[in-house]
Structure formats: C-alpha cells, structure tokens
Image (cartoon, rainbow, N blue to C red):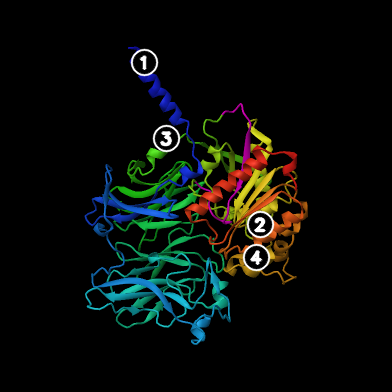
Amino acid sequence: MKKLILILSLVITANTIQAQQVMDPEMLWTVKRISVLGLSNDNSHIIYSVKTPNIAENGFDTAYFQIPLEGGAAIAIEKEAITVADKNIAPNGAYKVFHKAVHIEDIKATDIYKNLDKADAYVFTDLDNRHWDTWQDGSFNHVFYKDINAEDDTAIDIMPNEPYYAPQMPFGGDEDYVWSPDSKSIYYVSKKLKGKAYATSTNTDIYKYDLDTKTTTNITEGNMGYDTNPTFSPKGALSWLQMKTDGYESDKNDIIVLENGVKQNLTQQWDGTVNSFKWSNDGKKVFFTAPVAGTIQLFEVNYPGKKRIAPVVTQISEGQFDVRGIVAQLDNTLIVTRGDMNHATEVFAYNLKKQTFKQLTNVNDELYSSIDLPKVEKRYVTTTDNKQMLVWVILPPNFDASKKYPTLLYAQGGPQSPLSQFYSYRWNFQLMASQGYIVVAPNRRGMPGHGVEWNEAISKDWGGQVMRDYLSAIDAIAEEPYVDNDRLGAIGASYGGYSVFYLAGIHNNRFKTFIAHDGVFDTRTMFGTTEELFFVNHDFGGNYWDLDNKVAQKAYNEFNPINHVSKWNAPIFIIQGGKDYRVPIEQGLSAFQAAKMLGLKSKLLYLPEENHWVLNPQNALVWQHEFFKWLDDTLINESSETISE
C-alpha cells in the first residue's frame, strides 16, 4: 500500500512538473506548420503537409499525411502518392496551365555587354527596379499552358514578349490564374503597367486568353484598384475579389460575380472587407472569411443570380479564434483551417447546420498539452474621441493578480492589417506572456474588422488619433493593480516600428524601453526609397516636395518620427533586415545612429539576408533571444545605468 501511495505521489509530482512548463523560444521553433493540399480524388481524405523546423539545417523538414474526413488517425504518405484534384489541369483534361520566369529585358550588365561576363551591375531607366527583397533583372513571371499528351515539353506563353508579371509579384501564385469551365480560355491576374506607373498603382486586372484565337480581353477594364482571385462558380459564373481605389492597397475588398454579362457586387452594402472566399457546391451562395471584432470568422452571402433581390451577408461562426482558410465543402460540412493566439493552425470541420467545429488534425496537441497557456482576455477601452476600442490583453501562465508584472504595449503593423487571433513565429504573444510579460494589443484606428470607416481612419493620419488610441489602451490597462507602471515597454514592427519610433518622442515618460523592427523612422526617406510607391503616396497624401499639399506636409513634418527624436529619453532596441526593400535599411540605421548620438542605451540587430520578415530558423532564434535579453536588461534588471551610456 505504501509502495502504491509512493508511486501515485511520484506520478502526481511528475504531472505537476510537466504542467509547469511554459513556452520558450526553442519550443516555439518546434511548432509544426500545417498546410492543406486538398481532398483526395474520392473526397474521403484530407491531404496535408507538415513542416517541422530543422534548426541544425536552418530550414524545414516536410512530411505528408492524409486523414479521414470524419477525423481519426493520420497516415503518413509519400509525396509521389498524393492524389488531389489539380486546378491547373483543364476541365477537359487536355491541357495544364503553369507559370515560370521569362527573360524580357536586358538590365544586368552581363546581358547588355556580352564580353563583360564578370561585371556585376544593373542599368535602370525607370522605377520598379526592386520589389520586396529582389532586384529586377529583366525577368517576368508569365503564364503558360501545354498539351498534356504532347510528346515534348513545348508550352505556349500566353503573354509573349510582355514586360508584365503574372502571377503578381512578389507573392502571387496559381491562385492568380484559372481555367474556364469549357477549357477554351485561361483567366489570369496581371498589372500591365511599367516603371513609374507600376510602382504607383494597384490597378491589377483580370484578363481572358482565348486558346483558339490567341487573343486577350481585359475583363475588369474600368476598375482602377485590385482585381484578384478569379474563380468560377459550380454553375459557370466568373467571380473575383475587387478593390475600387487605385493606389489604396487596403481598400474594402468585395466579391464580384459576372454572369451573362451582368455584374453583381455581393458585399457592397456590407460594412466589412473580405479575406478569401469559396463557392457553395450548389452555386447558390458564397462562403468567405473576414475580420470582425479582433477575430477572423466565417460568413456567407447568397447569390441572387437573375433574381432582383439584394444579397444578404450573414456571419455564421463566432468565437475567440481565427478561421484562416476554407478548404472545401462536403454536404453540410466546411473543411477549414483555424487557430488562435495560443495555438498554431490545425484543420477543422465546421457543421453548417449545428454551427459547431470539430478538430480533425492534432499536429501540435502534444506540445500544447505539456505547457501552461496564457490567458487571452478581450477588453474594451474608451478612446479620446469616445469610441469603444477592443484591446486584447494576454496574461502570463499561472497569472497571479496579487503580483505586479512588466507590461508591453504591442503596436501592430500594416498599418491596416487585423490584430486578430493570429499565431506568429516572431511576434508570438504566447511566448511573450510565458516569459512573464503582460501584453496589451489594441485594435487601434486603421484595423479591419470594425467597419470601413474605422479601417480607413489611419490613412494620412499616422501620427494622429491612432497614437492617442495606443496611449488610451496602455493607460487604461495600467490602472490594473497587477500592472507594474515602472516597467512598461512598447514594441512593434513595420508600421508598428514607426509607432514605436513616434511614441518614443511623445510618450511623456510612460515607457522604460522600446523595440522597433523594420520601422519607418523618416517619412521623407521612406518615400524616397520604398519600392511600392503607391503605399506611401496614398497613406502620406502625396510627395514631400509639394509644399502646398498640407496633408502631405503633415506626414513629412508633424507625423515624422525623426522630427521628435530630440525628445527620446529611454533605451531603444532597433532591428533591421538587410533585404527589406519595403522599409529599407536607412530607416533602422538612421534610428540607431540617432539613439547613439543622443547617448541612449541602444542596440542594433542587423539581419543581412532577411527581408521585411525573419524566415530562417536560426535567425529567428537569434531574434527571440535578443528580444528577451533586451527586455531583461531594460525592464526586469533595470537600473539607473540603463537609461543612458
């Protein structure tokens, strides 16, 4: 009996020790990343890949699995054994569509001067000379198709000699082209503009290429914003996503349907913006995902067709999670991907009648079951203009309200991206809270999910109401007795990095430390060096040399962080990617140099091979360790010597 009691005691002790584990950087970089490839040809299984970080090799190992639609044990399969429907095969089975790079222009010196084969130079005569993390070398993605039964690999370029991209750069893939139901045409997305016009516009269009006549027709001519994601309904109606305004990358995204020459906007009257969509099997409605109230949920909208009735948008899921994609519909079930701030993406089945979710994959359940999870709370804070602003508050595991915790204000990037229940491998709230920090993440002005007006309010007002929103959020949460007001920090990347730089000059001694990654430090040089000029042109209201443009001048003067740098008075950690052409390197280097010249405690983490993100596993671990080392130095182990050097 004593032996049994001893054994039970040891088991209980072991379980208690196990439950006391919390997420750390190394553990975060064991989290598996799932990607659904599709349904098996007989619709009986979900086929998906799982990428596992391989720190030693500085990459990822990929394995493939299938799981029954009703759930159950996953079965490993070889890549060659994958059998999913291929959207790039024509419906008649005769052709396959694909894309590849084609050399169109001579820009590299080795192409211009054939005898100088060791030259390393580029010659540009216009803009669009670099994009995201790559310099233009004269090659353009083009869409091709070929006869599947042909004995050779001869393929036809449907954009011969055109100096335009299809798919879009830098992230477009095969979602940018689709076969017509009759297999006679290919529909594709392209922004057929060059140089300065390309850099200052978002006017992509959907083009129809006729295989018989070899002619191309612009289907969306006249719409000046983004036209993307061409898709056909089960009944043959063409549909796509559309933004109206040229140069505005975060405009309201609507679902458009074109049938028999009649065009309908299904979401025009709905006060929101669409992320992605999928037709119902019967073609009578469209399911879509969209941000709402700090989450991403499932919606549906009916398709009236010829009926003279207005489409009605209905939210069909609700909860503290993000629905990250819709895979397929099977009878009354949607196969979707879902996750939240404490859980990476998994595959779920959503019952349309019961409106309930069932988790189908469990690639990370064992990890999460072994650690204590933070608590994620939804709060509402009254802003300075008497609006109710949603604020996510993430509390450390085993939170004790009788203690005081260092607290971080998180500034979201975008600037118009949703602060939803996302799971990041860099800005991971679970990891931050697990290291003993409270995280305050406000859905400040400029975020979708709170109506179009709220989303648009940040454009041309980067340093205005949104900054007051940040301060309202941290001030409200700082009233809680468990927030240590002597240990507050502000952190963020991209526009969030801009926010950190700006707050550092106006915070009135609220914060003891700052961390900015790839942030905009000087709006003038940002306009002068960023690659997508349409973004700054729209958000700043114009260029910096137009002295009569009062809106733009506000962006380049009052709202320019560099003009407030003399008031910086707290330690600051600056991170910069060497291949970030969206927020180029001079932003981070200028900020670091200013901090050093001011005599502030400061540090620079330079990542020469990273772009606007951090994608390499070993670099990501360096990032995490330096991030928490800085917080330890300036918040946890802070002393008077940390303020300046």
Labels 4 & 3 near each other (Cβ < 8 A): no
Q: Which mark lies nearer to you, 2 or 3?
A: 3
Q: Residue furthest top?
A: 1
Which callout, 1 or 3, points at the residue further toward the start of the chain? 1
Q: Left or right: where does residue 630 sit relative to residue 331?
A: right
Which callout, 2 or 1, points at the residue further toward the start of the chain? 1
Q: How far apart are marks 4 and 3 (CA)?
A: 45 Å
The percent position of residue 363, horizontal first and vertical second, equals 36, 44
Which callout, 2 or 3, points at the residue further toward the start of the chain? 3
Nearer-the-camera pick, 426 or 473: 426
The residue where tag 4 is placed is 526
Q: For the residue marked with disc 2, what is the amino acid?
A: Trp
SS state under label 4: helix
- Where residue 9 sits, quadrant-wise, is top left
Q: For the residue marked with disc 4, what is the amino acid?
A: Met
Q: Could you tell me how many numbered marks the image carries?
A: 4
Which callout, 4 or 3, points at the residue further toward the start of the chain? 3
Which callout, 1 or 4, points at the residue further toward the start of the chain? 1
The residue where tag 2 is placed is 462
Q: Give the range drawn in magenta.
A: 400-420
Q: Left or right: where does residue 545 sit relative to residue 132?
A: right
Within 10 Å of the Cα at label 4, are there few (<14), some (14-19), or many (20+) other Cα atoms? many
The residue where tag 1 is placed is 5
The residue at the point 46 percent across, 75 percent down is: 221
SS state under label 3: loop
